[in-house]
Amino acid sequence: MRLHSPLSPLAAAAALALAIGLPLASGLACAQSQSPAPPGTEAGKPAPVPPPAVPDADAARDALKAREGDINQATLLKETLSAADKQYSLLKAGQVSATYDLNYSYIGTETINAKFTDSTLTLFEIQNTRAHTITNTGSVDYGLLDNLTGSFTLPLVSRYSQSTDFGGISHGLGDISLGLRWQPFALHRDGPTYTGSASLRLPTGRSPYTTIVGQNVATGSGNTAITLGGNVSQVLDPVALFGSLNFTFNLPARNLSQERDGLILTEVRPGTSVGFGFGFAYALSYKVSTTMSLQETISARSKLKFVTDDEARTTSSSLTATQTSGMLNFGLGLRVSPKTTVNVTVGVGLSTDSPDFTLGLNMPLSF
């Protein structure tokens, strides 16, 4: 038996339209969810990335031009060389530095005084002299220029002397000195450092030509002197080598009136002296360094004028012997802070004209 659909012809048409429309709507929805493929590409494959746009050649050249204020290698090199030309080892202009020195020296001598009258020995005396000298020195340095430094030195001398003529302690002002240090060339890497110096010593201390025998001893040299010198140093890490050479020109001491062995001393003309030294410094560590140096000074003869007869004003003169002073110094430096180093120096005399023993302490006062 055949079954007949209960749908009417109108319902059958509606069902047919729904069956065809659902797949078409689904395809349209899927097509709208994807971007349309560009021309020349296959469907379903990604589109190629377009190449970047090429800028205009004039615009590129303008962008690469140097602007005002830009830093290049030439500018850096010029600034570096200019800064190196301004580096010196002396104080900068306007800077002040103060230093304190404490020095002790001991001199022990034995002299024989002999006097002959008509070929007959009328005087024979052995004199032993022991002199202990403590010198407190304060110095101030001021930077006049970056390569020129001025200095002022003020010593205070305490001297204990023991001899047949005098025994006791004398205190007094020493010889004040004014100095200049000049560095002609700027510092260069791995190069030597040259420094010139000039100093003026003033006879402000008690002169040995005016002291009264048996009452006091001298605290100064008794004459004005000018010293010119130079030194050179070379750093070969961790060793620094140095050397120096100086000349001292002494001005005469006139208008004197000191009695010596029945004669009256009226004038002294000290001879010119030349000094030289060399040595090295070695850094044991960042805080400890040691130095060793040799110093020698050769002094020419001095001329002394006397009055033998005060009434007739008869004069005579004599010359002293050439003197040679040599010292061997050992030093130790201790850095107690990044800006402060204390130096201790021990010196041993190498000749009869030198102090037998010296001990020095040097420390900056500006921390």
Image (cartoon, helix red, strand yellow):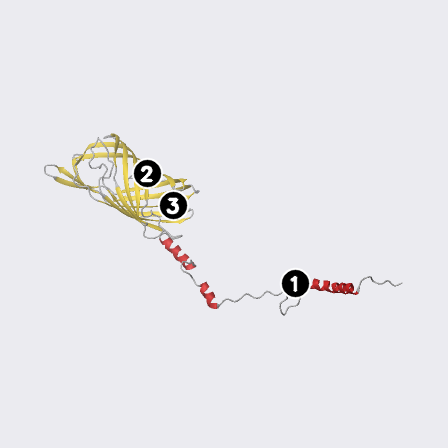
In the image, farthest residue toward the right: 1
Along the viewing direction, whichever of 32 and 336 lies nearer the viewer: 32
Mark 2 vs mark 1: give the one in front: 1
Q: List x then y, in percent, for residue 167.
A: 25, 29
Q: Name the kind of residue labelled 2 in the image.
A: Asp
| Residue at image mark 2 | 101
Q: Name the kind of residue labelled 3 in the image.
A: Phe
Along the viewing direction, whichever of 201 and 278 lies nearer the viewer: 201
Q: Name the kind of residue labelled 1 in the image.
A: Gln
| Residue at image mark 3 | 280
Check residue 244 in the rendering and tell me which mark sits there, or answer none: none
**Quadrant of the drawing holding the C terminus:** top left
Q: Secondary structure at mark 1?
A: helix
Measure how far apart labels 3 and 1 are at the Cα level. Answer: 93 Å
Check residue 32 in the rendering and tell me which mark sits there, or answer none: 1
Q: List x then y, in percent, for residue 77.
A: 41, 57
